Amino acid sequence: MDATLGDVLGVLDRLYDPAWAESWDAVGLVTGDPGQVVRRVLFAVDPMRVVVDEAIEGKFDLLVTHHPLLLKGVNSVAATTPKGRVIHDLIRGGVALQVCHTNADNANPGVSDALAAALGLKDTRPLKAMPSEPMDKVVVYVPANETQEMIDALAVAGAGQIGDYGRAAWTVTGEGTFRPLERANPTIGEVGTVERVVEDRVEMVLPRRRRRAVVEALRAAHSYEEPAFDIFEMAALPSERGGGRIGVLAEPLSLEQFAELVAERLPRTEHGVRVSGDPERMIETVAVVGGAGDSEFDRVRAAGVDAYVTADLRHHPATEARAYDAGPALVDVAHWASEWPWLKDAERLVKQQLADQGFTINTHISTTCTDPWTLHL
Ligand SMILES: [Zn+2]
């Protein structure tokens, strides 16, 4: 069965949710109509002219790139500018362009997972973990014979989801007591008399965004005029998503051997692999950031790793980070090479998830090196 662009975007948006992108980024669909049929998909790092030509000449219906074509706002896509010309040619060639940039960096698995896997790192965790979704806990006290109905009502409103389990709740039985005052209209008991009722304390978690719906459901389901309940904001735990990864080599290597491994496992570029540090130094723990990584030095230092593999390192941040050899060894690779391994992951996951929905799709990974450095003397 043929997939539409909308079907493919549905899969991509689940893997690389646009909501995970940084606020300055511009991800998502650049050209294309969600209703168009997609039979052939090309994956590439950069939507450079040469890659766009590869997509058009190869009769691909969709080009998925990591870097945006249009990051900053534009007032014109006239064919008189190079990017306007690209837009025209993509549309004329029937090629949709979809960008998965920092939303792919922050995914799990994301861009840095692929880099870590290419280098054989184990036990990986995010360098810059994103907080998990904000959660609340609702605690409500209900007459014991209403407990199951209350749990049902709260579950329908969005409470009680824990991983692959729904309607999850915890209860304990106790005693509630109250004296209905003058103007009360009590369900149980009478005005002026102290009442004691066997009640259950029901606890359920809920995403904070469902708070209003859950409280409304609670009030609707409770038989009391004034239900007693509490909402607690739960502490945020780090999630498994986020930028960069920290991992461990299967066995320690000297910095020189490790750099050779990096050069061997990543696609070759003119930029090559630059190393800062004593070549004899032993490397076991490694931090990686696909793409430009000199904004993450503080986190890398705090993680106490032996080496940091990333791209686009500059003189001053790099020398500061080395801290007279007290800091991690640095392995600087081409930006393009650091992100290219992700294409294989994206291709495999998209293909697999479309197949699960009964769609067949033909995919290809561009091997055209779009690193800007073309000669290294
Ligand atoms: Zn990048």
Image (cartoon, rainbow, N blue to C red):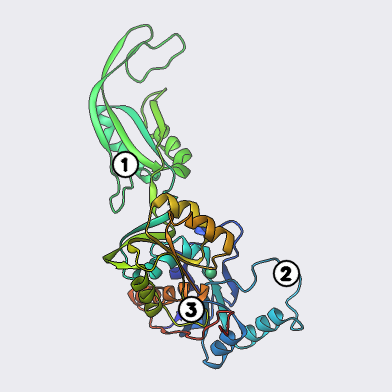
**Mark 1: few/some/many CA within 10 Å (<14, 14-19, 20+):** some
At mark 2, the secondary structure is loop
Marks 2 and 1, how far apart in space?
51 Å
Residue at the left extreme, as displayed: 173
Q: Quick one: label 3 or label 2, which is nearer the N terminus?
A: 2
Instruction: Where is residue 22? Give x, y as percent.
Output: 55, 57
At mark 1, the secondary structure is helix
Amino acid at circle 2: Val
Q: Relative to 293, does residue 68 appear above or below in the rendering?
A: below
Amino acid at circle 1: Asp
Q: Quick one: label 2 or label 1, which is nearer the N terminus?
A: 2
Q: Which residue is mark 1?
A: 152
Task: Specify whether residue 282 is in view.
Answer: yes
Q: Nearer the viewer, mark 2 or mark 1?
A: 2
At mark 3, the secondary structure is loop
Instruction: Where is residue 300? Give x, y as percent.
Output: 44, 55
Amino acid at circle 3: Gly
Q: Nearer the viewer, mark 1 or mark 3?
A: 3
Q: In the image, which disc is placed on residue 74?
A: 2
- Quadrant of the drawing holding the N terminus: bottom left
Q: Which residue is mark 3?
A: 272
Q: In the image, which disc is placed on residue 114?
A: none
Q: Quick one: label 1 or label 3, which is nearer the N terminus?
A: 1
Instruction: Where is residue 335? Give x, y as percent.
Output: 52, 72
**Residue at image x 44%, y 52%?**
301
Instruction: Where is residue 81? Give x, y as percent.
Output: 74, 81
Q: Nearer the viewer, residue 193 or 231?
A: 231
- Quadrant of the drawing holding the C terminus: bottom right
Q: Nearer the viewer, mark 3 or mark 2?
A: 3
